Image (cartoon, grey):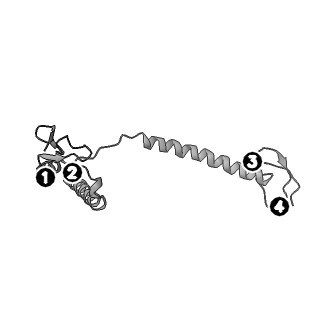
């Protein structure tokens, strides 16, 4: 064991070493604090260098045929999957669907929740004239 005093590299106090080798710190807490401080100072340097890297302007890639093709294939695949898993009841109505439906409708549609007139004729809706007719 040594008898002379050493100075701690972290807190700068004088101390007598407790181990055989030459010690740099008076305690474990000073040793850990020194290395944390050292790590923090190097970390700030790396953060600054990272900021310099982030400030570079981003370049926009040129439009390519491969990119357009990939986007088209992805869109078609998504539409195919959507058409497989969505019920017909939940799909939106198109103009063609409305035209087909109007061709299937007859001119006169019976109104079920309306009473017949005094002559016993039932109420019908005329789709062409948009009026109620008794027949």
Q: Secondary structure at mark 2?
A: loop
Q: Residue furthest right?
A: 3
Which callout, 1 or 3, points at the residue further toward the start of the chain? 3
Q: Secondary structure at mark 1?
A: helix
Which callout, 1 or 4, points at the residue further toward the start of the chain? 4
Residue 22 pos. (x, y %):
78, 57
- Give residue 64's mark: 2
Compare residues 88 and 116 and report the one nearer the observer: 116
Crowd class of label 4 (few under 14; some 14 to 19; many from 20; radius 10 Å): few
Crowd class of label 2 (few under 14; some 14 to 19; many from 20; radius 10 Å): few
Relative side of 36 to 27, left or right: left
Which callout, 2 or 1, points at the residue further toward the start of the chain? 2
Which callout, 3 or 4, points at the residue further toward the start of the chain? 3
**Residue picked out by circle 1:** 104
Between circles 1 and 4, the one closer to the viewer is: 1
Separation (CA) of disc 2 from disc 4: 69 Å
**Residue picked out by circle 3:** 9
Determine the residue positioned at 24% across, 56% down. Answer: 70
Relative side of 62 to 56, left or right: left
Residue 67 pos. (x, y %):
24, 53
């Amino acid at each position: 064991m040594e008898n002379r005093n050493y100075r701690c590299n972290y807190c700068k106090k004088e101390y007598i070493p407790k181990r055989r080798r030459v010690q740099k710190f008076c305690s474990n807490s000073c040793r850990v604090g020194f290395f944390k401080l050292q790590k923090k100072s190097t970390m700030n340097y790396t953060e600054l260098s990272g900021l310099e890297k982030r400030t570079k302007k981003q370049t926009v890639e040129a439009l390519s045929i491969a990119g357009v093709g990939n986007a088209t294939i992805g869109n078609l695949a998504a539409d195919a999957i959507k058409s497989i898993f969505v019920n017909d009841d939940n799909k939106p109505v198109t103009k063609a669907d409305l035209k087909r439906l109007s061709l299937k409708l007859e001119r006169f549609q019976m109104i079920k929740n309306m009473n017949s007139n005094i002559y016993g004729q039932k109420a019908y809706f005329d789709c062409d004239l948009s009026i109620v007719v008794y027949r």
